[in-house]
Image: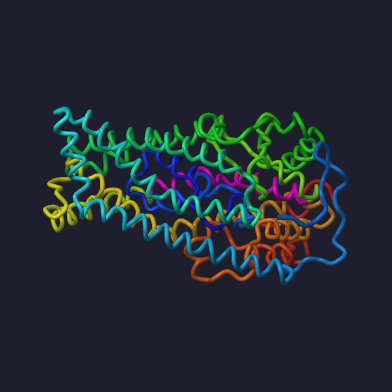
Amino acid sequence: MSPARCNRPLRGTLTLMLVLMLVLSPACASLARAQGRIAVKLAAPDVPAGAARAGAGSVGPLAAKEDKPITAYTLPPDELERATRLARSRTLIYIASTIWSVAFLIMLMGLQWMAAIRDLATRLTPRPWLQGLIVLPMVLLALSVADLPLSIIGHHISLAYGQSIEPWGSWLWDWTKAIALTIGGGTLALSFLFAIVRRSERRWWLWFWLLSIPLELLVTFAVPYVVDPLFDHFEPLALSHPALVQQLERVVARSNLQIPPSRMFLMRASEKVTSLNAYVTGFGASKRVVVWDTTIRKCTPGQILFIFGHEQGHYALNHIRLGLLATTAGSLFALWAGFHATGFLIGRFGRRWGVSTTADWAAVGVLLLLSSIFGVLGEPFENAFSRTLEHQADVYGQEVIHGLVPDPGQAAASAFQQLGEVSLDDPYPNRFLEFWTYSHPSISRRVAFAAHYDPWREGQRPRYFAQEPGEQK
């Protein structure tokens, strides 16, 4: 359950880079702030504890109905104050990071530092591809280092509010690995882009878009195998929680899907964070469901079944495929718009910036600047799409466990309440920030919906299942 509000961790950035950066995609900036790919993760917005706990290696009886049914997401006064302060701090970091990323690129261009780096590269070698191997790593390293102070502040806040337990040494090592992958992947991506620009300065946006599609699929397929294990430890869920796997297989049996135990994984998130999460990742043979160990420790069996049901919904409703299609369509429009915007900016400011054409290596600053701007402007569209998918998965998760838990609505509502408590999620988020930056519905909305959604009443009908699926209450 990734954070519902984007918070720009490094893993999203490097994943973006490995997808050829989608340099001018509207998803670029907002995806770089999200923890994983597109919008295929179950999540509560930024996520510490409540509710009964399941045993680490077994699954007890499914929880009975709550003595006091949950109808709204609430926090006690002291926790509410902390949640408000945390939300305010994260909002300030988000705004500062967004402004700084744009301002720093403008500064690089305005002071002609980009042109100076290009001039250095041309003095060292006449070969364009070798020039790129000089210019691009220097630019990407500068951008990463420039963002480091705000990243440090963000980790400090996470530690102060109990959201993270990762020591500074481990955090810095993760940052270093992410930067190394970002520089490596970004250098390859931009070298590829500029090779296309040099050959087709008027149609580069179309060729780049066409060639990026299969590579994006390849990266989506490879991330669970190549990127994720660099930062966290994964193991088959059946290895440590065989009883839980048996319960989850009952949920799988409710659909026509094939999610064998070999595609169910446990991530040892407790080594670094306190938050709860589960998500779907990968593509084709690499597609899998990942459950964090913190989720298993802090949630009841009924809550876990709902969480898994939500993730199964992403499988059943083809959300990864839909997300890829949406990103592909959005990137086509953004690349086309970026092509025209690049020409305008170089024509208007090129002399001042020391940039002659789009094929000029110094133009990488223009492309990255447009990427940041388009990313910010594209956030509300991407996030609205993401919230729609997440709501569908919420509905699916609640329906698929009907008959497997005593009260699906309360299982879902209590799961979201637990997630909100653990994450110190603000029950009253700013509506504009929610609209612009939340990739998932707010916890308050999710709890309210779950508590009142009961399609099995007379005259009602479930959205995704027959009236009485499988086992009965």
Residue 467 point in image, percent of width and height: 75, 55
Q: How many marks?
A: 0
Residue ID at (71%, 41%): 293
- Position of 447 with respect to 172 (left or right) is right
Residue ID at (14%, 32%): 123
When the figure is inspected, residue 109 is found, relative to residue 263, above or below; the finding is below
- Position of 374 with respect to 322 (left or right) is left
Residue ID at (64%, 68%): 427
Which residue is more in the foreground, 148 or 382? 148
Residue 453 point in image, percent of width and height: 72, 64
Q: How is the image coloured?
A: rainbow
Does the magenta-highlighted stretch encompass residue 297? no
Q: Which residues are magenta?
A: 303-329
When the figure is inspected, residue 126 is found, relative to residue 361, above or below; the finding is above
Which residue is more in the foreground, 208 or 355? 355
Residue 71 point in image, percent of width and height: 75, 68
- Position of 411 with respect to 173 (left or right) is right
Q: Classify residue 240 by image quadrant.
A: top right
Residue 302 point in image, percent of width and height: 79, 50
Residue ID at (53%, 43%): 320
Q: Classify residue 442 by image quadrant.
A: bottom right
Task: Please name the predominant secondary structure of the magenta segment in the image.
Answer: helix
- Position of 191 with respect to 272 (left or right) is left
When the figure is inspected, residue 428 is found, relative to residue 226, above or below; the finding is below
